[in-house]
Image (cartoon, rainbow, N blue to C red):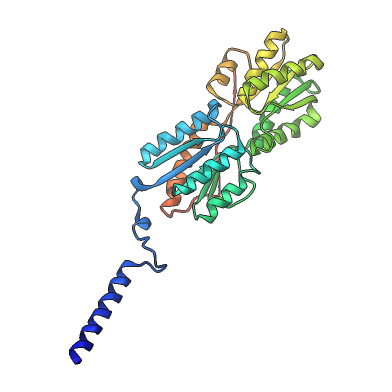
Amino acid sequence: MNIKKLSWTALLSSSLLLGACSMSPNGDDKSSDSKKSTDDLKIGMSVSTLNNPFFVTLSDGAKAEAKDEKVNLTVVDAQDNASKQASDIEDLIQQDVDLIIVNPTDSKAVASAVESANDANIPVITVDRASDGGEVVSHIASDNKLGGKMAAEYLQEVIGKGAKVAQLEGVAGSSAATERGAGFEEIAKSGFDVVASQTANFNRAEGLTVMENILQSKSDIKGVFAQNDEMALGAVEAIEASGKDIKVVGFDATDDGVKAVKDGKMIATIAQKPTEIGEIAIETAVKSLKGEKVEKNIPVELELIKK
């Protein structure tokens, strides 16, 4: 009888010991995840559109930095569709990535997707455009409002105070469009006669069409501020076809935009340095995942590019 009691006691003790060794405090073995090497880190990146050279350059900067940091990076293209972006982010959540970098198509619409990542305990970093909701580890962007002011001030310097101008706006609801417009309008309200301000959705073809329409009814304008270079280049095409002398300022300093400035087709563009934004996003992601403190807002310097 004593031998049986001893055997049962030993068996019970062994079972408890094995159970304790195999379980984390939550009853789930997460010990391997908490000590991931850099090679094991998975970062997802949702870009608003890869049909825009600016965001291609931004994602290329992120890819190059991810290679240097030896982390796994998956880039998905929302194609300027807020619903697709939400679905893409949900897919990244299901893939159990360690962190998600988001360049929102629509700052308001993306909020629920950011909140979904929050609920899954996946940290989020936003780049170039902010999210109107959810918690983000860090936001990396240029000061878009300052850039809008810089564009207006230089345009005024070239064409003079009180001149008639038009503005081509970006995607409605995006923080970049809102902030660049606010900066431009802060100067324009007392410095220009703004006769037209219409959206062309950051798209070159739409910039061409919208500019053609503006010229039909407002043929005496002297200047144009386009909230990105793609729209500015579309506007340039329309202006060249009309034979008018209208000064154009863009935003982003894409390769095509800078070339247009050098060729005298645009008078200036605001440089945002997308490669640097992409690089900093990955650097910040890795630091955060290593438990290091990162800044809530990381500004990237702007520069006026003129001939």
**Left or right, 274 with reference to 238:** left
The furthest residue to the top: 243
Quadrant containing the C terminus is top right
Q: Is residue 141 visible?
A: no
The residue lying toward the viewer, choosing from 37 and 296, is 37
Residue drawn at 31 percent across, 71 percent down: 19
The residue lying toward the viewer, choosing from 94 and 100, is 94
Residue drawn at 64 percent across, 20 percent down: 205
Q: Hey, which quadrant is residue 249 in on the image?
A: top right
Q: Is residue 262 above or below residue 111?
A: above
Q: Position of residue 95 (x, y in %)?
A: 44, 47
Q: Can residue 204 be seen in this view?
A: yes
The furthest residue to the left: 3
Quadrant containing the N terminus is bottom left
Residue drawn at 46 percent across, 46 percent down: 285
**Left or right, 42 with reference to 217:** left
The residue lying toward the viewer, choosing from 215 and 182, is 215
The residue lying toward the viewer, choosing from 145 and 191, is 145
Q: Position of residue 244 (x, y in %)?
A: 73, 10
The furthest residue to the bottom: 1
